Image (cartoon, rainbow, N blue to C red):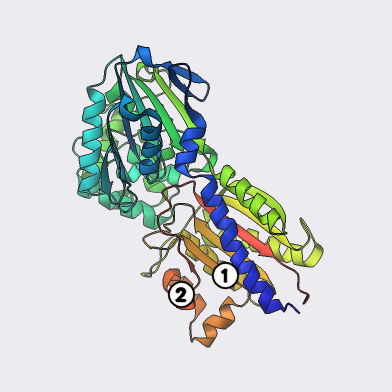
């Protein structure tokens, strides 16, 4: 007879398999090759055709955690048609490449290596002309990696602003609005440098709603944000007085019109710019759903646009667990409820963790004692915050196991120390760098309560 304990262990294994299916579905190499093909002696990228005879050089540039496999896919496809290339990736996310140079840099707080890579990219595209085709590889993490501080702003200034924004709970749209207005490369800046070359951005989306001007801070697309937005965001989180004087000065000069704002729709620099989304969170969720169905679960995708404070979002997902168990709605058990997006965490303690680990810990408090209920929260990039874990997994026994070890889950949550909590329980989800990034996956499995 299969006991409930056996069922729970099986469900935990299923959760890991379902999460892995989500990651595989947004493999950057496969994503590029789905959308970029050689057809009739030219490149077919989505609905656009680029004849080789129209270009003297093909250049490859980019920034993001998935940059290396995206570049490898282009090298496999184009070979020596690529004249030159430069990309910036997160440290540990590189791969051997033949024609594209890699700069490894720090994420999410930028460093000098990011500046070195960004300056090399800007120099390369600035030299491009009308008969050059620039393939720009954009993926999650690109905003922190493509570091080209605006005049008067230092690397240390950008580092301090980044730390303040990450700690206050600002979402990625807000963070990237600030980044764009402190950069020469972001917010359409790369398009300015590359004009009049043709620029095609191949984009792996890591932001809610797949907003092109937010993904990696939109280096080659029109920006919709303004200097006024930056001031409003910094005041909203009560950190205006804490940002460096150089940052305050630049924003104030921008508000007065003394500093040009980022280029907007209709600007001539975008006349030869094209964009193609090659990977999204909903693709990952659909693949996860198919895997779950194959494992015997009734499956529902709630949303790929989840955002908000992690502890608050938890209340919605765990409420669904209670509803499934109590009324069989929206699905009867065995059920797999999936959603995706990117939550935030307002840091109040000095612990170690990330938004997904905090999501799992907050979930454990709510599902405590529920039979055969599993929650997994994981980042598709394999990195949750400043940790080596993608996320964590919790179930109805998590708190009992913690208490048996003398751990106080509420105290760990108060100190934002979810990493050490789950590390001691051996419930961290560790994938290593996946070299992709389409935000996070949140999974709820509700199984039968009967022994079989």
According to the picture, the residue beneath numbered tag 2 turns out to be 421
Under tag 2, what secondary structure? helix
Determine if residue 226 is in view: no
Q: Residue at x 45, y 47 (%)?
A: 437
According to the picture, the residue beneath numbered tag 1 turns out to be 394
Q: For residue 354, what is the image quadrant?
A: bottom left
85 vs 310, left or right, is left
407 vs 323, left or right, is left
Q: Residue at x 43, y 55 (%)?
A: 169
8 vs 119, left or right, is right
- 222 or 77: which is nearer to us? 77
Q: Quadrant of the C terminus?
A: bottom right
Q: Position of residue 65 (x, y in %)?
A: 38, 46
Under tag 1, what secondary structure? strand
For the residues labelled 2 and 1, the Cα–Cα distance comes to 11 Å
Q: Which mark is residue 278?
A: none
Q: Position of residue 192 (x, y in %)?
A: 30, 24
Q: Is residue 66 above or below residue 261?
A: below
Q: Quadrant of the N terminus?
A: bottom right
Q: For residue 56, what is the image quadrant?
A: top left
Marks 2 & 1, CB-CB < 8 Å contact: no
- 9 or 214: which is nearer to us? 9
Q: Residue at x 68, y 72 (%)?
A: 372
Q: Is residue 87 above or below residue 13?
A: above
Q: Of label 2 and label 1, which has the lower sequence position?
A: 1
Q: Residue furthest right?
A: 327
């Amino acid at each position: 007879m299969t006991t409930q304990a056996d069922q729970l262990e099986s469900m935990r294994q299923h959760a890991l398999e379902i999460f892995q299916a989500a990651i595989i579905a947004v493999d950057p190499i496969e994503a590029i090759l789905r959308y970029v093909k050689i057809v009739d002696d030219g490149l077919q990228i989505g609905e656009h055709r680029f004849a080789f005879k129209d270009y003297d050089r093909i250049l490859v540039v980019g920034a993001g955690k998935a940059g290396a496999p995206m570049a490898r896919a282009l090298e496999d496809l184009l070979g020596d048609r690529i004249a030159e290339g430069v990309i910036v990736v997160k440290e540990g996310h590189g791969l051997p490449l033949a024609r594209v140079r890699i700069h490894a840099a720090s994420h999410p707080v930028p460093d000098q290596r990011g500046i070195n890579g960004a300056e090399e990219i800007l120099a390369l595209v600035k030299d491009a002309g009308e008969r050059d085709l620039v393939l720009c590889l954009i993926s999650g993490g690109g905003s922190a990696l493509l570091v080209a501080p605006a005049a008067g702003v230092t690397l240390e200034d950008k580092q301090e602003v980044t730390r303040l924004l990450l700690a206050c709970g600002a979402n990625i749209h807000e963070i990237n609005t600030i980044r764009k207005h402190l950069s020469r490369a972001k917010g359409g800046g790369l398009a300015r440098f590359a004009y009049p070359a043709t620029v095609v951005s191949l984009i792996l989306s890591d932001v809610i709603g797949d907003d092109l001007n937010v993904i990696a801070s939109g280096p080659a697309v029109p920006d919709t944000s303004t200097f006024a937005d930056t001031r409003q965001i910094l005041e909203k989180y009560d950190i205006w007085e804490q940002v460096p004087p150089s940052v305050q000065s630049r924003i104030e000069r921008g508000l007065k019109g003394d500093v040009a704002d980022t280029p907007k729709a209709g600007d001539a620099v975008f006349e030869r710019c094209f964009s193609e989304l090659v990977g999204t969170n909903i693709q990952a969720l659909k693949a996860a759903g198919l895997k779950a169905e194959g494992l015997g679960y009734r499956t529902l995708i709630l949303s790929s646009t989840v955002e908000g404070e992690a502890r608050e979002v938890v209340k919605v997902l765990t409420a669904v667990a209670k509803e499934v168990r109590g009324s069989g709605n929206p699905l009867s058990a065995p059920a797999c409820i999936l959603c995706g997006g990117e939550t935030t965490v307002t840091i109040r303690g000095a612990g170690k963790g990330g938004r997904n680990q905090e999501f799992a810990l907050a979930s454990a408090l709510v599902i405590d004692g529920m039979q055969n209920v599993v929650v997994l929260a994981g980042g598709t990039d394999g990195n949750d915050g400043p940790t080596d874990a993608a996320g964590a997994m919790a179930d109805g026994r998590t708190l009992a196991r913690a208490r048996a070890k003398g751990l106080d889950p509420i105290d760990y949550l108060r100190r934002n120390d979810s990493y050490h909590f789950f590390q001691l329980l051996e419930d961290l989800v560790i994938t290593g760098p996946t070299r992709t990034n389409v935000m996070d996956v949140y999974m709820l499995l509700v199984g039968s309560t009967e022994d079989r």
